[in-house]
Amino acid sequence: MWLIITALAAVITTAIWYVKAPEDKYKLGLLSLIFWGATLMWFVDHVMAYLTEGGEFFEINLDATLLGFSVIILALLVWLIVLLVSDPKGVLKRVLKGQRVFQGKVQQVDFVKSRVQLEKE
Amino acid sequence: MACFLVPMGEAIATSVVQKGMEKREKKVSGERTKNTGLNWSRKLSWLNKLLWGGTILLALEHVWHGEVVPWPPFLTAMENPADVAPMLHEMATIGVAMAITVTVVWAIIVMIAESKVKAITEAKGTPVSGGE
């Protein structure tokens, strides 16, 4: 079941990546390659197990389904970490510098001043 | 049992090669690289993403099935000497097959990408130089 779920995730991610291409600001190419890598490896695993041991090709039960969704969550987590570390929109950089974007312009936020103002109010 | 260790080994090797290629390409930016826009470090990054992605997700599956544990010797097959030989056999068959399949698929992707880039370059009328 996890092979089906991962393959489905790979197809969906690749389709979204293609729609947005050539721009790949949010690193969807990375996410689709992660899913395709796992799909290929599990496909080989399933084929070889089927040829040597026989039995059912797909394991369809609750445990296998839960594993499939856990795999998706892990892949999304890896992708999110890479995305936040690379920070393509510069959001984290601005937050750490204490800046905000207001009407398309970058403004410096004085946190101490705004706190004093809030306390006065 | 531990089949994902073979693609992981390949991923480590290709990551090292990619880093070396990146440094080399920064130093020497050849004519061919400029014309095609597809350098080897970029092509290898696709292989690395396929291999590392597969390895990480397969590692989770092995943890799920109790084949990998967070304490030494990390692989449950290593705890029983009778399980070591089947584990090595699985690595030599399924693990190697996984690594070869991923590499072959990557090679096909690279070939398609190269031919597409070549077609675009020829359509633009700029000659592709650098045949070694």
Image (cartoon, helix red, strand yellow):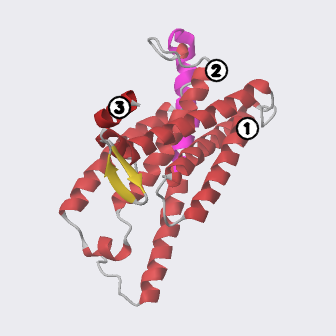
Q: Residues within 10 Å of mark 3 (few under 14, many from 20)?
A: few
Q: Which residue is mark 2?
A: B65
Going by the numbered disc 3, the residue's amino acid type is: Arg
Left or right: where A8 falls relative to A118: right
Q: Residues within 10 Å of mark 1 (few under 14, many from 20)?
A: few
Is A59 placed above or below B119 here? above
Image coordinates of residue B77 in percent, x first then y, are 55, 15
Quick one: B77 or A40, which is closer to the camera? A40
Subunit of mark 1? A
- Is any part of residue A12 visible from this angle? yes
* First of labels 3, 1 by sequence position: 1
Going by the numbered disc 1, the residue's amino acid type is: Leu
Q: Are marks 1 and 2 on the same chain?
A: no
- Is any part of residue B14 visible from this angle? no
Helix, strand or loop for disc 3: helix
Q: Which quadrant is home to the N terminus of chain A? A: top right
